[in-house]
Image (cartoon, rainbow, N blue to C red):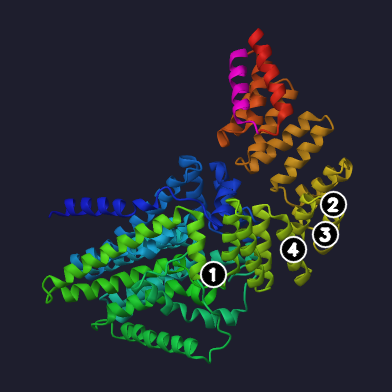
Amino acid sequence: MSKKYLWAVFFAAYFAGYWAVFPGNFYYDDYHSIRNNSWLASLKNVPRFFVDPTTFSARPRAAMYRPLLLVTYALDYQAYHWRVWGWHLTNLILHLINAVLVWILVKRTFNRERLAWLAGLIYAFHPAAAEVINYINCRSSILFTIFILAGLVAVSGIIRSEETGKRGIGWMVLANLFFVLGVLSKESAATFPAVAFLYYWIFSPQDIRRKLGRCASLLLPMLVLLGGYLYLRQIFFGRIISGPFLPRPQLVNFFTELKSYFWYLGLFLWPSRLSIEHSVSTETSLWNIRALGSLLGILLLGSVVIFSLIRTKSKIAGLGFLAGFYFLVLAPTSSIIPLNVLVSERAFYPALFALAALTAGLAESAWGFSGRVAPAALAMMLLSYLSIISARGRVWQDGGKLWRDAFENAPDQARVAGELGNEYARRGEDDKAVKFFLLSDRLNSGQTATVYNLGAIYMDLGKLDLAEKYLAQAVEQEPEDVEARVNLAAVYKAEGKLELARYHLEYALAQDPKSALAHNNLGDLYFSTGDLSRAEEQFLSAVHLDPKLEMAHYNLGLIYDRAGLSQEALKEFQKAYGLNPGAPDHSLQAGMMLLKLNQPKAAEDWIEKTLALDSQYAIAWYYLGLAKIQAGDQGGARADLENALKWIRPEETGLKAEIEQLISRLGQK
């Protein structure tokens, strides 16, 4: 079979094999980082992604600096809006790019086409990759792996250039570019300079002196870029390694994660334990059989890497590179950065290349002397992979199945029990919902980060009583935590407990007078009680402290509108829109002000921006109809008002009656 047809068969098999991924759904972290993240709704926000980590999520505390990832989300929104199959298609295509890069890298490195095909097939269809494709929020792992693999292809280009007597400057520039794109996708790509050094040193045929010179030329720019990136993290987060709220002590995380290197090896060999969340016991000391055994295993494989660096022409040098790659790409999530989730398929995904290539090497070795046994075994393995992918795809189609499956795998995880409870609540199975919410409460570890996260989850779900409970507990444990107080105040306000809300906001401002969000929320509280002068004072303080806080500009607009200052209100709403074009109310309010200023055509333009974001927004259709009435377009006004009736909520009876009267009057003219 020619190469062209071989690739055609591969691509056809790839999309057929992953058909069970569609249409899928948004789950868990997808909501705060994607579905509820209004920053993604406009490409005008793209520049802000690169300077403001809070655009990563609807939750300020979940801020991360992954601007390139956000760009892909924003592009998906433009292409598919919230049609989730399109978001999965992007993940699927990005994984396909990685599979092709695996083929290219293995082919260029070992110059064996069969080995390249074997590695590419195993990588493309391993079920662990399917989990990452199904979980849209895991795209960061797929994306930064693209740039890690592409960067290694560039390093292989440097080696090939040397063999022809060229310097390979273009390949060096590409390697550095891919490194930058990698860290802009996910911070785990920060280990790429070490991976690049390992690859170049093992596979370059140059003598040691020339290798040292070329490594300096390749790596010094990367280290400078890495220093700049780490400096940005220091500015954004106040520390380099991670955010300020760690879920467990650093040493406990380190001892526990020692096991993960071999846990992932087991997952690769036996991919039947796939889940959105896993249960892993923590280790508080190095002196137990699991942690100590893992450390000894790591040291043994580390010795293989060191031997390969010294004896680069040895038969195990390739193995040394794969072992080094495996540990280096896992190190950020398995040794350095403490995470809520100790093990996950998304953390394993970049290391999949090393195990796929190693397995391919073993399969190729068996190919020559086993006759038809090796091809048959490979075919059976790939068929089993496809069977698991199909089964997991069906699980991911239904939230109830997904969280029941997760609970079977991780019955000791509080947030799994909470999410399963929420699924039962959505289905109206209140008894089961209460059972799992109570279980989630019992399983809660009591650590501040965990307590806060549970509070934030329940706040997003609208379960205010549970949100209040956990956020109050977080504040009790960390009285100086301003963000937790501000969120607790928001819950109290939603519950109508205004005095408690004011107390916590004033307390937060006493701790941090420069908290723009606290000023804004206190202003919102005053606004809700009719104290407009004090509300305006707080909103002005908020925009002074943070001119980019669009909520404060929006709220100032509401104040000015209430005072009859339509022109001033318009300016604030337009500022809010400029800061966040993805929030429908910003453009709607601007259009409403233009109506009050007797500028119906301009009002139409602004209201249409709102409807481009949400075509089912009844109030927007209503005001668009009013704008067209003001402009003399009776036919267009009637059509827009009919759309408003189509999408209006049943409880909005007064507005419905008003719209029906307007339509009736238009019909008489």
Give the residue type at disc 1: Val
Image position, residue 427 (x, y; %):
57, 51
Quarter of the figure with residue 655: top right
Residue bearing mark 3: 504
Do labels 1 and 3 touch, CB within 8 Å?
no
Task: State which quarter of the image contains the C terminus.
Answer: top right
Instruction: Check if mark 1's residue and mark 4's residue have beta carbons within 8 Å.
Output: no
Q: What residue type is labelled 3?
A: His
Callout 1–callout 2 Cβ contact below 8 Å: no
Sort mark 2 into few (<14), some (14-19) or many (20+) by Cα contacts within 10 Å. Answer: some
Q: Which mark is residue 341?
A: 1
- SS category of the residue bearing label 4: helix
Residue type at mark 4? Lys
| Magenta segment includes 264 | no
* Residue under label 2: 498
Q: Nearer the viewer, mark 1 or mark 4?
A: 4
- In this rendering, would 658 be left or right of 2? right
Q: Work out how far the residue at label 1 is from the one at label 4, CA to CA, in angstroms.
A: 23 Å
Q: Give me the residue at 34% from left, 68% from top.
A: 353
| Residue depicted at x 72% and y 64% | 470
* Residue named by callout 4: 469
Q: Earlier in the sequence, mark 1 or mark 3?
A: 1
Could you tell me residue 312's position as x and y percent?
Answer: 28, 81
Q: Position of residue 477 (x, y in %)?
A: 75, 72
Discs 4/2, front: 4
Q: Residues within 10 Å of mark 1 (few under 14, many from 20)?
A: few
Above or below for 253 versus 420: below
| Outermost residue to the top | 669
> SS for tag 2?
helix
Span shown in magenta = 634-649
